[in-house]
Amino acid sequence: MMIKLRMKCLNCDKWNCIPVDKIVIEQSSPEPKVKVLIPMYEPLKAETCKKCKKVIAQPRELIRIVKSQTSE
Ligand SMILES: [Zn+2]
Protein backbone atom coordinates (compact mmCIF):
# COMPACT_ATOMS: atom_id res chain seq x y z
CA MET A 1 0.00 0.00 0.00
CA MET A 2 1.51 3.28 -1.06
CA ILE A 3 1.00 6.23 1.19
CA LYS A 4 2.53 9.62 1.82
CA LEU A 5 4.49 9.81 4.99
CA ARG A 6 5.51 12.96 6.77
CA MET A 7 9.08 12.74 7.92
CA LYS A 8 11.07 15.20 9.88
CA CYS A 9 14.57 15.97 8.68
CA LEU A 10 16.99 15.17 11.47
CA ASN A 11 19.38 17.79 10.20
CA CYS A 12 17.24 20.91 9.88
CA ASP A 13 13.88 19.84 11.37
CA LYS A 14 11.95 20.48 8.19
CA TRP A 15 8.95 18.23 7.59
CA ASN A 16 9.09 16.43 4.26
CA CYS A 17 6.34 14.43 2.63
CA ILE A 18 7.65 11.28 0.97
CA PRO A 19 5.92 8.42 -0.84
CA VAL A 20 6.39 5.14 1.00
CA ASP A 21 5.14 1.61 0.88
CA LYS A 22 3.45 0.50 4.06
CA ILE A 23 4.28 -2.98 5.24
CA VAL A 24 3.53 -4.83 8.43
CA ILE A 25 6.16 -6.84 10.19
CA GLU A 26 5.33 -9.62 12.57
CA GLN A 27 7.40 -9.75 15.68
CA SER A 28 7.55 -12.40 18.31
CA SER A 29 6.43 -11.37 21.71
CA PRO A 30 6.97 -12.82 25.19
CA GLU A 31 3.49 -14.31 25.00
CA PRO A 32 3.62 -17.26 22.54
CA LYS A 33 0.03 -16.82 21.44
CA VAL A 34 0.24 -13.10 20.95
CA LYS A 35 1.40 -11.70 17.67
CA VAL A 36 2.85 -8.25 17.59
CA LEU A 37 2.33 -6.44 14.31
CA ILE A 38 4.53 -3.48 13.66
CA PRO A 39 3.77 -1.12 10.79
CA MET A 40 6.88 -0.09 8.88
CA TYR A 41 7.37 2.18 5.93
CA GLU A 42 9.72 1.56 3.05
CA PRO A 43 10.74 4.53 0.91
CA LEU A 44 10.21 3.95 -2.81
CA LYS A 45 13.35 5.82 -3.70
CA ALA A 46 16.08 7.86 -2.07
CA GLU A 47 14.59 11.04 -0.73
CA THR A 48 16.39 14.23 0.15
CA CYS A 49 15.28 17.05 2.38
CA LYS A 50 13.73 19.89 0.42
CA LYS A 51 15.52 22.43 2.55
CA CYS A 52 19.04 21.16 3.28
CA LYS A 53 19.32 18.45 0.58
CA LYS A 54 20.42 15.80 3.02
CA VAL A 55 19.31 12.26 2.35
CA ILE A 56 16.50 11.50 4.77
CA ALA A 57 15.22 8.19 3.42
CA GLN A 58 16.52 5.38 1.27
CA PRO A 59 15.01 2.27 -0.22
CA ARG A 60 15.46 -0.80 1.98
CA GLU A 61 15.92 1.41 5.00
CA LEU A 62 12.67 0.78 6.73
CA ILE A 63 11.16 3.57 8.73
CA ARG A 64 9.46 2.72 11.95
CA ILE A 65 7.07 5.23 13.36
CA VAL A 66 6.95 4.97 17.08
CA LYS A 67 3.81 6.43 18.49
CA SER A 68 4.46 8.43 21.58
CA GLN A 69 3.15 6.48 24.50
CA THR A 70 3.65 6.95 28.17
CA SER A 71 4.21 3.34 29.10
CA GLU A 72 7.25 3.81 31.26
ZN1 LIG B 1 16.80 19.16 6.13
Image (cartoon, rainbow, N blue to C red):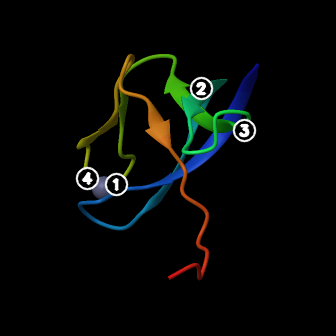
User: Compared to 59, does 36 lie above or below?
Assistant: below
Give the number of the disc on residue 25. 2
Give the number of the disc on residue 72. none
Between marks 4 and 3 in the image, the one whose residue lies nearer the viewer = 3
Between marks 3 and 2 in the image, the one whose residue lies nearer the viewer = 3
* Proximity of marks 4 and 1: CB atoms separated by less than 8 Å: yes
Type of the residue with mark 2: Ile
Ligand 1, what quadrant?
Answer: bottom left
Of the image marks 3 and 2, the number of the one nearer the N terminus: 2
* Proximity of marks 2 and 4: CB atoms separated by less than 8 Å: no
Q: Mark 3 points at which residue?
A: 34
Crowd band around label 3 with a 10 angstrom C-alpha radius: few (<14), some (14–19), many (20+): few
Residue appearing at x 34%, y 25% in the figure: 58
Of the image marks 4 and 3, the number of the one nearer the N terminus: 3
Q: Name the residue under label 4.
A: 52
Q: Residue 29, percent across and down?
A: 56, 41
Q: Name the residue under label 1.
A: 51
Type of the residue with mark 3: Val
* Proximity of marks 4 and 3: CB atoms separated by less than 8 Å: no
Kindly tell me whether mark 4's CB lies below 8 Å from ligand 1. yes
Of the image marks 2 and 4, the number of the one nearer the N terminus: 2
Kindly tell me whether mark 1's CB lies below 8 Å from ligand 1. yes
Which quarter of the figure has residue 33?
Answer: top right
Between marks 1 and 2 in the image, the one whose residue lies nearer the viewer = 2
Kindly tell me whether mark 2's CB lies below 8 Å from ligand 1. no
- CA distance separating discs 2 and 4: 32 Å
Between marks 1 and 3 in the image, the one whose residue lies nearer the viewer = 3
Type of the residue with mark 1: Lys
Give SS at disc 3.
loop
Give SS at disc 4.
loop
Type of the residue with mark 4: Cys
